[in-house]
Image (cartoon, rainbow, N blue to C red):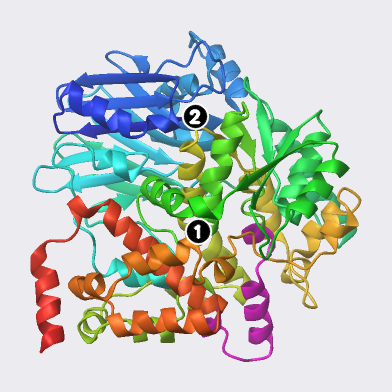
Amino acid sequence: MCRIYGYFNAEASPHEMRTVAALQRHGGPDATGIRQAPAWGLGNNRLAVVDLDGGSQPYGLDGQVQVVFNGEIYNHHALRHRLEGLGHTFDDHCDGAVIPALYLEYGDAFTDHLDGMYSIALVDLRGERPRLLLATDEIGMKPLYHRWDAAARSLHFSSEIPALLGFAGGGARIRETALDAYLATRTPFGGQTMFEGIEVMAPATTLVCDLGSAPRSRHRPATELPQPGPGEGAATAVRVRRALREEVGRLLVADVPVALITSGGLDSSLVTALAAEHGPVHSFNIAYKGAWPFDERHFAREAAERARAAYHQVEIDPADFPALLEETVWHLGQPNADPIALSTYALFKAVRAAGFTVALTGDAADEVFGGYGRMRNAAEAAAAGAAWAPDYLDALSAVPAGLRRSLYTDAFRDRLREVPALPAEAEHDLLHGPGTVLDRITRFELGHRLPAYHLRRVDHLSMAGSIEVRLPFCQRSVVALGRSLPDRLRLHDGQVKRTLYAAAAGLLPDSVLNRPKQPFTLPITAMLRPGQPLWTQARDLLTAARIAADGRLDPKAVRTLFDVQAERPGDTTALALWSLLVHEVWREQFRPVRASAAPAQALRAAVAA
């Protein structure tokens, strides 16, 4: 597991590359490797997980290919055996060492043979002109950001946005209309980011650039896997349990200590139970000092005790939240309105301090097996012949559409008339694509929301603590099983995740299996109240003067949010204030690259008129 970075058809000094490396060394504190040549450079920060004494990057041979790699290749033993049979030799047993030989054998199609999570940068030196190839895994577990300068025909890339901004001349302006996309979906979906000119590669994408030419991207079709055989209820649950048991076992293999993140809900508790079948395990849970709603520590403890796991309770103090929020937002590089982000950052710091380098989580089970209430509500509304899309989209948002529009100035609303909050193709497939409503929602959540909202957050905040996260529910066999289930085996008669609950029967305490589903989140409705640290931070940052100077939000409307939350605390108002707070913290963190004065002045002039 690593952080990677580099440039193509450009130049950078060794100092510049070291600066970029330093900006993301938290994700790879064990070694730094840099290779530079005329017009290109590759860099890597290594977090040692497999073959601790090997794994020196960049991989490859001079005159052929050079590779830097972030992630884990779970089938590297089988690939190594195959490649050795074809005459290749290897200096170590690190998983990424197979990539150069795999590319030499299969060219751009080498990713078809990889089973794992990854982002890869490869320079092919064999032709007349060097050739850069960037690639991401099928579900987007390891993000990669890039910036293409069309005038200079140069490309820069990095695992994290703050590091990408560390390249000389890498300052980027804030994309003003992205505020609406952020509030509509809690973080930007698709390839765009909050910065102009900085994009993030989509899952299952290969980008190729010949020296001096423009890059071209290709979305790779999903690998075809055998579909589950016929069966209902118990038979299907057995197949799901078997697949999860196998994947959890594979993901426990490492040359460093492995921990489990147990929230107290079904998904992470099931992963913990299956991991414990392979031997003693350690389970970590996050909670908050004091008495707060949605405290799940007793469920997490019961799940750990049932699995005979060593239980670690991490408790953080709300008094520390303002400073913690600033660190969290910086590591994310752009705003993410999920309140659990703050807790995620603190939790992984604690896991690392306890001596662990790898952690398994239950992320993505809801997307794969139909676990969200918004999915159930949409499917039920569609079955009744009622409109489902408006309520579903509002459930995705940080601020529902009606309230969102009321927060904007007239000038900003006018600017948004031709700017969709969702990527156009994604929205069209969601509303009009083939399949049932649940089929379309599942494609949308797995293809767009999961990588943008969940996986980037988990990647950045775990690596901020030098922790590699592994995700059993993101593995091909599990995703294929979940996607193949008919609607009735995911959602039926008001129940979500029917097959996954059946697969967990007998493995978890009844208290976990039978508890009402609740969000794994920070209780912001209770914490954003007068007298609380987050309330004070929000009032200090969301002042009328700052809001008016920016020109996009109406200061009176934002003040009304504070008044309503103080008098009648509610989830909708609290999440709106939280989202605006996160956005303002992010603007403050990246002030040197905020938009030029001209657009803001034009907005203020329009407001004054």
| Quarter-of-image position of residue 15 | top left
Q: Secondary structure at mark 1?
A: helix
Q: Residue at the spot x=71%, y=46% of the render?
A: 262
- The number of numbered badges drawn on the structure is 2
Q: Residue at the spot x=43%, y=54% of the render?
A: 322
Q: Bounds of the magenta span?
A: 366-392
Looking at the image, is 399 positioned above or below residue 596?
below
Which residue is the site of mark 2?
1
Can residue 554 be seen here?
no
Which residue is the site of mark 1?
447
**In front of the other: 143 or 150:** 143
Rate crowding at label 1 as few (under 14), some (14 to 19) or many (20 or more) other CA atoms within 10 Å: many
Q: Residue at the spot x=27%, y=32% of the render?
A: 20
Classify residue 493 as left or right of residue 471: right
The amino acid type, in three-letter code, at marker 1 is Gly
Rate crowding at label 2 as few (under 14), some (14 to 19) or many (20 or more) other CA atoms within 10 Å: many
Looking at the image, is 537 positioned above or below residue 348?
below
**In front of the other: 101 or 72:** 72
The amino acid type, in three-letter code, at marker 2 is Met
